[in-house]
Image (tube, rainbow, N blue to C red):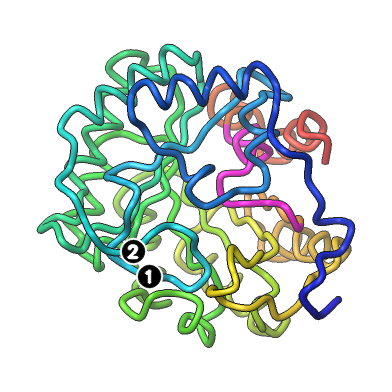
Amino acid sequence: MQRGRRKPDWLKSRPPSGSRFTEIKERLRERDLHTVCEEANCPNMGECWSGREGPGTATFMLMGDRCSRGCNFCDVETGGMEALDPDEPANVADAVAEIGLDYVVLTSVDRDDLADGGSAHFAETIREIKRRDPEILVETLIPDFQGDPEAIDRIIEAGPDVIAHNVETVERLQWPVRDRRANYEQSLAVLDRVDRESDVHTKTSLMLGVGEYDHEVYRTLGDLREVGVDVVTFGQYLQPSRSHLDVFEYVHPDAFETWRAVAEEEFDFLYCASGPMVRSSYKAGELFVEALLREGRSPADARRHARAAGGD
């Protein structure tokens, strides 16, 4: 493990480029749509948008580009909330059709200022996409909706294929990593409700390098399996700006591979994408879900397919 501010060589990435990248960006601008790829300065944006495998993908960020919470790891602006755009669900669905995606990831800012947390708006976006093409696989990365079970059920009833909610880090570090309104038990409860109330695959993500101990990560994996989480991802925390949470350490790629093996072989997660540049909406995870759901492969075969196609 490497401490300090200087990024190691394994964290270097190419700037986004290519005709496919440009096309997706133009489509989004035409419809005034936001992606978490851009808002959070994701290091994989060029790879995902350029479509190294398949038609490319983007994670649409719903309900505006400003969040009601202020997590110390996140680059999305806080406060100054605006009214929801009633045309956004249809605009997102139209953009998905125009870009030609067959796997869509939807996420959102937190909207604690809204009575339902924006869950009805989120659910309508899922339905609009499925109305146009029921074969499109929709993954949702949802907020905690302040633990409101009715809001979570609205998402389930809209019919997504994967529901993700990120615990982000181990229990001890929830604060200062996350906003104080978020907490570990509430996030586990969200994932548990999805598992109990649906047959949808569940997913979560953790950042490493924020000061966690190995035994805490191990315990977190156990907690996640207890609430039925199917897929987990690990990635390196990268500081968006000097005003954000400091990086405690840069975790070596070998450690990420160890956590992948522990998650899949010891805890029996269906799939684990783990690496310094992995983010929750990582392409290899989508390849796994597609192989599992669309092609009917076994979890083991789907893992092999995802890693071969994704270059892991």
What residue is pinned by disc 1? Answer: 70
Report if the CB atoms under discs 1 and 2 are less than 8 Å apart: yes
- Residue 27 in percent (x, y) is at 44, 19
Q: Quadrant of residue 207?
A: bottom right
Residue located at (55% from left, 17% from top): 23
Please say whether residue 86 is one of the residues in the magenta stretch.
no
Q: Quick check: 172 above or below 165?
A: below
Question: Badge 1 local density, few (<14 within 10 Å), some, or many (20+)?
Answer: some
**Alpha carbons under labels 1 and 2: distance apart:** 6 Å
* The furthest residue to the front: 242
* The furthest residue to the left: 115
In the figure, is residue 43 to the left or right of 165? right
Q: Camera-side residue: 87 or 275?
A: 87
Determine whether the residue tagged by mark 2 lies in a helix, strand or loop. Answer: strand
Q: Which residues are magenta?
A: 276-289
Q: Quick check: 32 above or below 200?
A: above
- Residue 237 in percent (x, y) is at 65, 66
Q: Quadrant of residue 300?
A: top right
| Dot 2 amino acid type | Thr
Q: Camera-side residue: 305 or 95?
A: 95
- Residue 51 in percent (x, y) is at 67, 23
Q: Quick check: 312 above or below 11?
A: above
What residue is pinned by disc 2? Answer: 78
